[in-house]
Image (cartoon, rainbow, N blue to C red):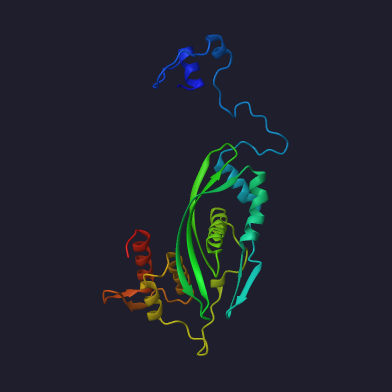
Amino acid sequence: MSTIQERAAAAAGRAATDGPQDDLALPQEFVEQFPAADPLADYEPGDDDPDMVPVHLAWLRVRKEIRAIAKGEQYNGGGTRFNFRGVDTVVNTFGPVTLKHGINVFPAHVEASYRDTTTSKGNKMHECTATVTWQIVGPRGDILTLQTQGEALDSADKATAKAQSVALRVLLLSAGLTPTHDKDPDSSYIERGNDAPARSADSYRDEILNPKTSQGRLQQIGYELGNLRMLNRQVVNETGEQETLDSLGRRIYSERAGGGQ
């Protein structure tokens, strides 16, 4: 059966439908009195409603209002200490502002991969790497589609939820180009002493070539190598040829991202 809009259009002589017809066409005077219209044409926003602007403009207004989120939380464990922006902090900052400007964020599709691993203390952990496709929906209903990854470890059943939360944080900070206003960590460099030796280039090579190393970990290795000034360090690759760690890491990441090994 054709839709009301199709029957109305046929009765008005504006267009013929391609599907099967029936005898329930609307009267001509009804069609002329109530023509088809843009569903937002007669919309009258209330005092608290967002402006009906395209999604890219609404998102720009969100970015203008948020400006920056500092790394106000600190991790201190396992001999490692660093500052970070937690998921709750980021969501609590973006949530009210996106609501104000009529932005909705939905996870449209999730692809997850898993592996079991063991910590340095021998504890069994479950690792999840989640690739999430997001839809940022504006006040008019138009959509931006973006994709991010998150990686997390858990000793029970929370690895997937944690990984998706990390992917959400990455989405908001990346799509928002949200700075920290903190000092650039590369603005100073301290030479390591003998009491704090760095990992060897060969150990990084072995981890990169390990088929169990996830794509998320490969990205982390690239970041570590950059901080250690080891990206251009030459190693012997899997074919016996000399190759920089940077080139090796990028190549292996691309092969695995494309389905190769």
The answer to whether residue 155 is above or below residue 66 is below
Residue at 51% across / 77% down in the picture? 119
Name the residue furthest front. Answer: 156
The spot of residue 152 in percent (x, y) is 52, 66
The spot of residue 43 in percent (x, y) is 64, 29
Q: Quadrant of residue 101?
A: top right
The spot of residue 200 in percent (x, y) is 42, 82
In the rendered image, the quadrant that contains the C terminus is bottom left
Residue at 65% across / 46% down in the picture? 99
The answer to whether residue 1 is above or below residue 48 is above
The answer to whether residue 150 is above or below residue 108 is below
In the rendered image, the quadrant that contains the N terminus is top left
Q: Is residue 110 left or right of residue 102?
A: left
Name the residue furthest right. Answer: 47
How many numbered marks, from 0 up? 0
Q: Is residue 33 left or right of residue 2?
A: right
Q: Quadrant of residue 230?
A: bottom left
The spot of residue 154 in percent (x, y) is 54, 68
Q: Is residue 47 left or right of residue 81?
A: right
